[in-house]
Image (spheres, grey):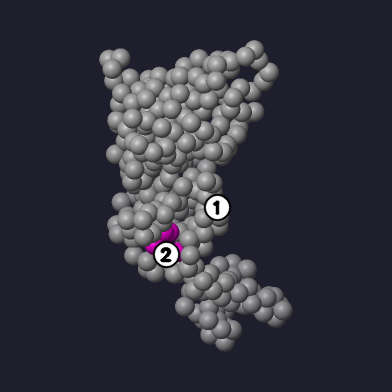
Amino acid sequence: MSSDSISTLEFPSAPLLLRHCPPQPPSYVLTATTDAAAPSGMSYVVTSVVECITKRENGMRQVFRVKLTSEAFQEPRHFICKTALGRQWYKSLAEEAMLYERKLKPLWGKVVPHYYGFFSGETYEGKTGIILLEDCGQLASDWLSRQPTYLRKSVLEAFIALHRAGVSFQQDSTLAAQVNVVIQYDPASAKYVPRLIDFSAVYPNHECLSEYGDIVVGAPEPEPSEVMCPSLYGIFLASALFTPTHIRLRCGKDLPWEYATDAETLKAHITFPDDMSESDVECDIAAALRERAQWDQEREECDDGPVRVSEETS
């Protein structure tokens, strides 16, 4: 990599200083470790830190929303900077950067944020690394199931694309759908679009067996054997795009979904255990009807409703 093609990132020193220290320069200049990002040979200057989004390990790992200038564009823009201080966290961030530069590269700007490089240098806190990413918006302010249909479908398709790229999140699928997804309004489509973020805790060599076809909204909820990937199956369920096939009653029996409309219909299609008391039967019926009613109500409120997103920071 020639010196002419090396990108640099100038970052204010104050947000990176975790303790009292001798006077430091107002900013540090870090250099790109590879020319894998596009465009290369750029000089990026952080003019202000808008907010600290997350702070972990006593500040050794932080995520900032920043305003940044560059010769690549005229007006300052918002970007995301993921920072790591010290060799342990630097190594972890470098591994995430390598993931962006290899397996995630085909997904830049479509499924994951556009990646502008991994910048390395020395600060007062030691070995320091910063990943520079496109700012793709905010976290959702509600569960995935409470978002409009089109957004839920886009999120599920994004997770499918990630798995097909050979990467999956380590955490519970429902949690991943909440904390590893940001959403932003796209004027071109007049819709919100999702991006998957934070690949610090993933399975980087995921061999996904799923070959699930087109997503048909309202189709019967698929069985695990149809999806062929437990992690991805959790996202299928969390998306609430499919119609449940049954309700598991407290007595252990499965009630077909279409019969959970009223007590008489339910009783006509389920034989409760002989040793079950009448009051327990009534409680079981009430719970099943309540579950169906809550699902119907959520779909009515949310399928064509507004996107639920955290407030943006200016």
User: What's the residue type where badge 2 is placed?
Assistant: Thr
Residue at image point 37% right, 54% down? 186
Depicted 258 relative to depicted 307: above or below: below
Q: Is residue 69 visible?
A: yes
- Label 2 residue SS: helix
Q: Which mark is residue 149?
A: 2
Type of residue at label 1? Glu
Q: CA distance from mark 1 to mark 2?
A: 21 Å
Front label number (1 vs 2): 1
Whether residue 152 is in magenta: the answer is: yes
* Residue that badge 1 annotates: 311
Q: Residue at x 45, y 64 (%)?
A: 148
Tell me where the magenta segment starts and ends, as one range: 148-153
Q: Residue at x 39, y 22 (%)?
A: 8
Along the horizontal axis of the image, is 210 left or right of 249? Answer: left
Q: Position of residue 102 (x, y in %)?
A: 32, 31
